[in-house]
Image: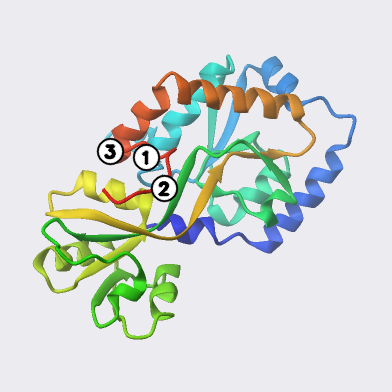
Amino acid sequence: MAFAQFRKLSPLLAGLLLAVTASATVGAHAADLLDTVKARGTLKVALEGNYPPFNFKDPKTSELTGFEVDVAKLLAAKLGLKPEFTTTEWSGILAGLGAGKYDVIINQVGITDERQKAFDFSDPYTLSSAQLIVRKDEKREFKSLEDLKGKKLGLGQGTNFEQKAKSVPGIDVKTYPGSPEYLADLASGRIDAALNDSLLVSYLLKSSNLPLKGGSPIGAVDKIGIPFQKGNPQFKAALNKALADILKDGSFKQVSIKWFGIDVSKPPTAQ
């Protein structure tokens, strides 16, 4: 299973350097991206296409679906455009944007200082952090990783959550191939809590029938935005207005609840 937190914090430096170089070659006299997309009539959107529930292919129809596919359609409609989707590997997605292969990326790209050196970003559209998962009947209060000293904590093997948990002495960290395994152990009482990204916690709780709930958020809140090439102030203003419009009219919240059961534009909280 993919982990949103891991992917948001794993940019490839080589891709960013390529993106910066490619962006610089566009030139200061190029038309604003808003003029380009309006003349074309489409908004070219890059995403992975294999990252459920954010974007993936429906196993029955092979059509792209997911939270960010729905968000892209809403934003394109507000801009008077049709979305044109391109699927590409995460490892090269930023470099492709810098090379002008598409207009935007809507694929859980975290807004970081490093990435802002290469690209402009929209306002954030999702907020997330690491979050604990506990049983519904849990009476103990786990408000931080320190509260889990002497307890068993389950999480996905190889994720940055593993490093975060192992940095706190005294936690008995149990690693698993994926979320189904550690959620089953949590529900049966073999571990005391689990840890994942808050967006995926919401999705997992919504899609499972296990007696679990979201616990306390852990650490800093990550802001997710839509990157595009620098030097397009009119496009940035129009994109942010479109985003503000779907947040105001309730359509974003409707899509968010469809996939996660909560409004993911709000800071994560215990559920």
Marks 2/1: CA–CA distance: 7 Å
* Total number of numbered discs in the rendering: 3
The percent coordinates of residue 124 (x first, y second) are: 55, 39
Q: Earlier in the sequence, mark 3 or mark 2?
A: 2
Name which residue type carries label 2. Answer: Asn
| 259 displayed left or right of 264 | left
Q: Which residue is mark 3?
A: 261
* Marks 2 and 1 close (CB-CB < 8 Å): yes
Picture residue at 35% right of the left edge, 44% below the top: 53
Image quarter where the N terminus lies is bottom left
The percent coordinates of residue 154 (x first, y second) are: 27, 71
Q: Eyeballing the image, is 182 above or below 25? A: below
| 167 displayed left or right of 205 | right
Q: Earlier in the sequence, mark 1 or mark 3?
A: 1
Which labelled disc corresponds to residue 129?
Answer: none
Q: Eyeballing the image, is 176 above or below 200? A: below
In the image, 44 versus 161, the foreground residue is: 161
Marks 1/3: CA–CA distance: 21 Å
Name which residue type carries label 3. Answer: Gly
Name the element at disc 1.
Answer: strand
Residue 83 makes an appearance in the image? no
Mark 2, other Cα within 10 Å: few <14 / some 14–19 / many ≥20: some
Q: Quadrant of residue 240?
A: top right
Picture residue at 60% right of the left edge, 59% below the top: 11
The percent coordinates of residue 76 (x first, y second) are: 54, 22
Name which residue type carries label 1. Answer: Lys
Which labelled disc corresponds to residue 57?
Answer: 1
Mark 1, other Cα within 10 Å: few <14 / some 14–19 / many ≥20: some
Picture residue at 49% right of the left edge, 46% below the top: 48
Which labelled disc corresponds to residue 50?
Answer: 2
